[in-house]
Image (cartoon, grey):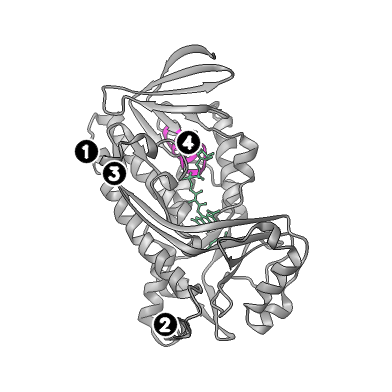
Amino acid sequence: MPLRGWVVKTQVAIVGAGPSGLLLARLLDRAGIRSVVLESRTRAYVEARIRAGVLEEGTVNLLREAGVSSRLDQDGLRHGGFELAFANGTHRIDIEALTGKHVTVYGQTEIQKDLADAHLAAGAQVQYEAKQVQLDQLTGTAARVRYQACGAWQELECDFIAGCDGFHGVSRQSIPVERLRQHERIYPFGWLGLLVDLPPVSKELVYANHERGFALCSMRSATRSRYYIQCSVEDQVTDWPDSRFWDEIRMRLPEPYAARMAIGPAIEKSIAPLRSFVTEPMRYGRLFLVGDAAHIVPPTGAKGLNLAAADVRVLYEGLAEFYASGSQALLDEYSSRALARVWNATRFSWWFTALTHKFSDDAFAHRLQLAELDNLRHSTAASQAFAENYVGQL
Ligand code: RFL
Ligand code: PHB
C-alpha cells in the first residue's frame, strides 16, 4: 500500500504535459499564476511522438507570447502555398495571395522540447510518471487531484483543473456521462506515416488524391521528410516494409514527383486511425477540457494542434481575468468560444478528408472528387474559401 503524502495547494492543476498542458503552464507562469503539471509518461516518451507539422499564425503568435519561439522563429519554414495532386497533374493553392497569411512548418516534437526546456529554465517542474490520476470534487468549493508518484499517494487542492490529457486521458472520463454530449465519426481507413532523413520531394506540401488512395508529402526541414499514405485500418506497420511504402506512395503521385522522390530507410513509421470527435460542453464545474481531451479531427486539415493552442488561449484569458479581477465572465464563455472554432475545424477537416481519400470502389464518388478539385482551378471563390480555412482564424 503506497504511503500518503502531503496535500499541496495550487491555483491550477494541469493534467497532461503534451503541447496544450505545457503551453498553458508557461503562459500561467509568466502571468504569476501557480500551476502543477502531472504527466503519466516519461519526458523522453512524450518528446519522441511524431505528430503535427503545420502551424497557423495564431499558434505561432501564442508560442511567441509564451516566450518559447526562438528556435521556431529561426528554424520554422514559412509556407505560402501547397499543391493538390490529382488526375496526374497538380494545382497550387496560393494561400498567401488568397488570404495574406501563411503557415509555418515546425514539428510538434520540437515544440514539445522548447516548452519543456523553457518550463525547467523558469524553475518550474513537471511531475512525470504520475500514475492513477484521479479528479475529485469538481463541483465543490475546491477541486482535488490524487495521484501516485515515487511510491506514494499525493494530493493537490486547486481552484481549477485543466484537462490537457489527450483523447485517452482521465479528465473527460471524470465527467458524469449524462452531463456530456459526444459526437463521433470513425473513418474506414488510417494514415501510415514515415519519417526519413532525406530532402522533401517538393518545397511545399503535396496533398494527393489517387484512385489507390490519399497520399501526403510533408517535411520537418530541408533535409527531413514526412510522408503519409492512406492505409487500411486493419494494417500493421509490419505489413509495410520500407520498399512497399516507397512503391505505393510513388504510384499515388504524378510522374515527375515519383521520379525525383529521394527514398531511403525510415527513421520512424506508425499508423494512426482517423476520427472526428467533439465533446460538448468542454467544462464541468472546475474542470476545463483542452485540446485532444475534448476533440479530435482527422489530420488532413492539420488542425489538431492548432485547435489545442486556440483552446489554451481562451482558457488562459479566462484564468488571467479571474485572478486579476475575481470575475468568472470569460471562464463562463470558455466552452462556447472554444466550440465555435472546434466545429468549424471539424467541418473543414471532414470536408478535406472527403475530398482527398478513397472511401470505396465507387467510380462515381471518385469522379465527383475530381470535379470538385478541378473546380478549384477555375474558381477563385472556391480556392479562397479553402485557403481561409487552411490558414485558420486568428
Ligand atoms: P496530447 O498531445 O495527446 O497530450 C496529452 C498528454 O497527456 C498525457 N496523459 C496523461 N497524463 C496524466 N494522467 C493521465 N491519466 C494521462 N493520460 C494521458 C499523455 O501522455 C500526453 O502527454 O494532447 P494535446 O496536448 O491536446 O495536443 C494535441 C495534439 O497532440 C494533436 O491534436 C496533434 O498532434 C494532431 N495532429 C496535427 N495537428 C496539427 O495541428 N497539425 C498537423 O499537421 C497534425 N498532424 C496530428 C498530425 C496527429 C497525428 N496523429 C498521430 C494522431 C499527424 C498525425 C499523424
Ligand atoms: C505533417 O507534416 O505531419 C502534416 C502536415 C500536414 C497535414 C497533416 C500532417 O495536413
Residue at numbered disc 2: 372
Which of the labelled discs sits on residue 180, or is there none? 3
Q: In 3D space, how far apart are the residues under numbered discs 1 and 3 (Cα atoms)?
A: 22 Å
Residue depicted at x 34% and y 41%? 315
Report the mark closest to the observer, 2 or 1: 2
| Three-letter residue code for mark 2 | Glu
Residue at numbered disc 1: 329
Residue at numbered disc 4: 26
Q: Are marks 2 and 3 in contact (CB under 8 Å)?
A: no
Q: Specify start and end residues of the magenta stretch as a single range.
A: 15-28
The quarter of the image holding the C terminus is bottom left
Q: Position of residue 123 (x, y in %)?
A: 55, 26
Q: Secondary structure at mark 4?
A: helix
In the picture provided, is 261 more to the left or to the right than 38?
right
In the picture provided, is 295 more to the left or to the right than 264?
left
Report the mark closest to the observer, 3 or 4: 3
Which of the two residues, 19 or 273, is positioned nearer the viewer here? Answer: 273
| Three-letter residue code for mark 1 | Ala
Say if 149 sits above or below 22 in the image. Answer: above
Q: Position of residue 355 (x, y in %)?
A: 45, 75
Q: In 3D space, how far apart are the residues under numbered discs 3 and 4 (Cα atoms)?
A: 29 Å
Q: Earlier in the sequence, mark 2 or mark 3?
A: 3
Residue depicted at x 63% and y 82%? 254
Majority secondary structure in the magenta region: helix
| Three-letter residue code for mark 4 | Arg
Q: Position of residue 60 (x, y in %)?
A: 48, 52
Q: Secondary structure at mark 1?
A: helix
Instruction: Give the crowd class for mark 3: few <14, some 14-19, many >=20 residues within 10 Å.
Output: some
